[in-house]
Amino acid sequence: MTQNKNKVAIISTSLGSGGAERFASLLSFMLEKLNIEVHNIIINDVVDYEYAGKLMNLGIESTDSFPFFKKIRKGFLLNHYLKKNGINGIIDNRPRNNLTREIITKWIYGDRRKWFLVHSYNTDTYFPKPIFFSKFLYQNAEKIICVSQAIEEIIKYKFDFKNTVTIHNLYDFSKIEIEKKIPISEQYIMYFGRFDEKVKNFSLMLEAFYLSKIHLQGYKLLLMGEGPDLGIIQENIKLLQLEEFVIIYSFNKNPFQFVKQAKFTILTSRYEGFPLSIVESLALGTPVISVDCKSGPNELIKDGFNGLLVENNNPHLFATAMKQLVDDTNLYDFCKKNAAKSVEHLSLETISKQWESILF
């Protein structure tokens, strides 16, 4: 049986903080349950999440001090590893916007079966320009897997691909851990994810929190994560004189005890893919207020049913939504009651069947 087992490599930038990285971790466990031999290959040496199967850490194995030669070394190591381990399928979970790198990668992957993930509505992150070369690189893939219907629609429109499919991000609800006590006694609302201003739009988030005045009703804003723009966030907090009302915690691979006890969670992104933070929050029975960005939130949140969906880039409307969910007890209780059941269709069992249908 072992000799006949399909061997699949999940290739990711890392297994560190981030939705795509969290997805790779969950995917490895799902594939293992499907009796697939899983090989996790990461480009950079960051491992925060658990994984099933084997790990090849190219960030450790490539030791050259010059960045250019280190990249070449990683390419040789990847090629050798795929051949040595008899990998016959590749799930590419990386951003793919460098044309030269992707042409080389296409040669390394060879004639193995290939599935390419697209995690963001910003397709420039996943398809190098010009469009002609993206068609050359990906039109013969087994599937281009889009995590939202909106992403699949825009990819079909831009590239005229015939091999696309939408499979929403899975979440293994059995892995939720909420046993630990949290060190916050006050009521709070919460954001958890990357500290990336260009994508997550913390300027909008903080302005809306200030305008809502819910901090004067005893609510704190908890920000949990890591990323390049912590300094920008802290500057905006000072400008709005919110130092007393905003709590910043570093990345936690198990934020669920905090999410469970939050009044609600919030998302103000300029664009997304299919935000795991919304799925995880709703799964725990915590309502969500999100902007209606492309893409994902409007495929998860039913306005007034399990949370509130707000026009993007409008801090006054977002502030009103925050105030409404704090003050309107009946609305809040209704959204909280519906939250968990609204994402039951994203259970591991359901999403696993969709993956099984497109794999070997």
Image: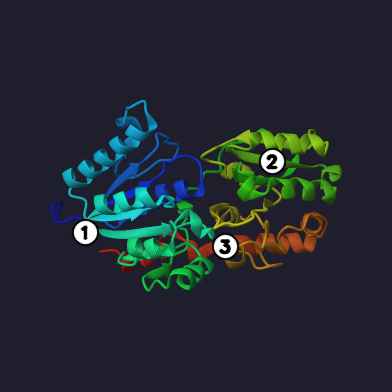
Secondary structure category for the residue under label 1: loop
* Left or right side of 257 for 313: right
Kindly report the distance in space between the C-alpha atoms of the residues bearing marks 1 and 3.
33 Å
Q: Residue at x 46, y 51 (%)?
A: 174
Do tag 2 and tag 3 residues touch (Cβ < 8 Å)?
Answer: no
How far across and down, in percent of the image, does residue 173 sit?
A: 48, 54
Establish if 321 lies above or below 49.
below
Looking at the rendered structure, the kind of residue marked 3 is: Gly
The circle on residue 296 is 3
Residue at 32 percent of width and 27 percent of height: 63
According to the image, label 1 marks what residue?
A: 111
Give amino acid for label 1.
Asp
Q: Is residue 185 visible?
A: no
- The 10 Å Cα crowd at callout 1, few under 14, some 14 to 19, many 20 or more, is few
User: In which quadrant is the C terminus drawn?
Assistant: bottom left
Considering the numbered disc 3 on the image, is that residue within a helix, a strand or a loop? loop
